[in-house]
Image (cartoon, rainbow, N blue to C red):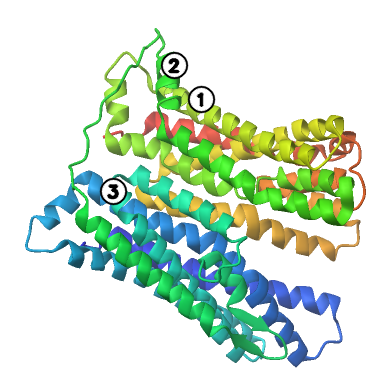
Amino acid sequence: MPEISGKDVGLYKMVLFLLSLFPAIAVEIDVSRFTTHYPNISPEGLGYLITADLLAKWLPGFLKFLLVPLILILLLSRFGSDFERGNVTLLLSKPLTRRRYFLSWVLEGLKLALISTLGIALSGALAMLAHGFEVRDYLIGSLALSLSLVGVIGVALLLLPFATSRDSGVFLGLGAFVVLLLLGKSDYSFIPTVYLERALSIGESLSVSYRAVGELLALCVALSLVGMEAFRRRELRGPESFSVPGFSFSPRGLYGVFLGLSLQSRRFIAFLALAVLTAFLNMGMLGDYHSNFGVPGVLNALISALNGVFLPFVVLPLGAVSISSAVEKGTVRVLLSKPLKRRNFFLGTLLSDLFAVFIGTTFYVALIVAYALHLGSPSGRTLELGLAFGSLLFLSLVQYLALSYLLSVFMRGRKALFLSLVLAFLLAFAVPISVTVASTSAEDSFLDALSKNSLPVPSPNLHYTVLERAVSPKRGLPPKSLAEILNYPGNLAMLVIPTVVYLAIAWLTFRKADLR
């Protein structure tokens, strides 16, 4: 049986704490929002609105965009790390069957799901009770929605035998997350991301779709059995030793590091693949806007799609393992044993990841723009918007990359991965939604209030949203001139200034860090 270290126990407690906090915050946001818009609503009506909003909007987004990638990456990266270190081979050399060892990972996954479910159910219920609301429907609905995590565990167990290192576990987890989002557009309720939309029916009373529950549990069992059989049959080779293939060092070392860490990097390949997959997630939005609003709708949808709201979930985890992974594997010590300075290694790694982000962003923007042109969008205006807002997207992703470097130099292993996913969820979803809701009740115009409220918040997606709304305020009308962006220079600057700060702190920390 795999041992649970003290670090893992602390990580699980941190997960439970965060899960217990967010649904309670969602309740407080809804209380403020609904009482502002409906000042004369009765307590019963307010409780119903909040329950429906939590179960239809907050919890599905919370589960889909935080817990799903978190569970996938934690399980797969932890197993990959054990396999890479030879712990799996060592444990199986003892009187322990592969099936029993695999079942221990099933229990680990169920433990994560149980901790998450308790946090969601109890925190939201306690927050509602504090306001005197009825919590029965919320408890039933939150428990039913949390069953989606069981299906996610089945996906993780299916991929478990293929995680041969921590990095490969991260790539597999991110890939599975993006694929699940793509499958979320299908009609099969047994897929966890579809299940979140089909499990509950919220009308005058709450009802649970037991068919969807049964299909989801059946999928989990089937995937677990397939994963167990694949693990039983696979050859357990020891981890490969580290080597530095084909480095050609210049006198200052930067040229060789850049080439070696970019073109030969699995992070580079993974980011390109995941960027292309995420582009397909937004193509449906362009089609819907075209059906409802015609060409103006396509142009507005193009700007919204170039926000790249899913890409932080790719950039942050991949960047979070860049420096820390090189230190843990001994890559840094091998490179620094050659005529290479720390500055050159840090800059070479940064250039490598910047190159990956640039190429990935280019592919993403090209696919979105090409689909807009396919729908009949005017080429001149489409290319202009694609270039301008594609550049803003690149600046946003570079800021996320810089933040992930900051995590990578301060933390190691799963701590950096865990925090990167939490920050991706907060900065890409939770914070923008909260600031947007707070700006709707301001005395100033909505856009001016949103711009003002967003300035102290280091959320690239939020600042992109301000610049987007300056040009594209209504879906049914053609976007305004790009010169409107210049009316909000503070938001444009906030896409650049935090990047410089994050990178400066990361470099100063790495320069003095103990690399042993």
Where is residue 16 shown, x and y percent of the image?
44, 70
Is tag 2's residue or tag 1's residue first in the polypeptide sequence?
A: 2
Cα distance in 3D space between marks 2 and 3: 29 Å
* Cβ atoms at labels 2 and 1 below 8 Å apart: yes
Q: Is 374 placed left or right of 223 in the picture? A: right
- Looking at the image, which residue is at 29% across and 45% down? 164
- Looking at the image, which residue is at 88% across and 53% down? 293
Where is residue 14 shown, x and y percent of the image?
42, 64
The crowd level at tag 2 (other Cα within 10 Å; few <14, some 14-19, many 20+) is many
Split into 4 quadrants, where in the image is the N terminus?
bottom left
Cα distance in 3D space between marks 1 and 3: 26 Å
> Which numbered disc, 1 or 3, marks the residue closer to the eye?
3
Q: What element carries label 2?
A: helix
Where is residue 320 shown, x and y percent of the image?
45, 43
Q: Which amino acid does label 1 sit on?
A: Leu
**Does the rendering let one see residue 197?**
yes
Residue 254 marker? 2
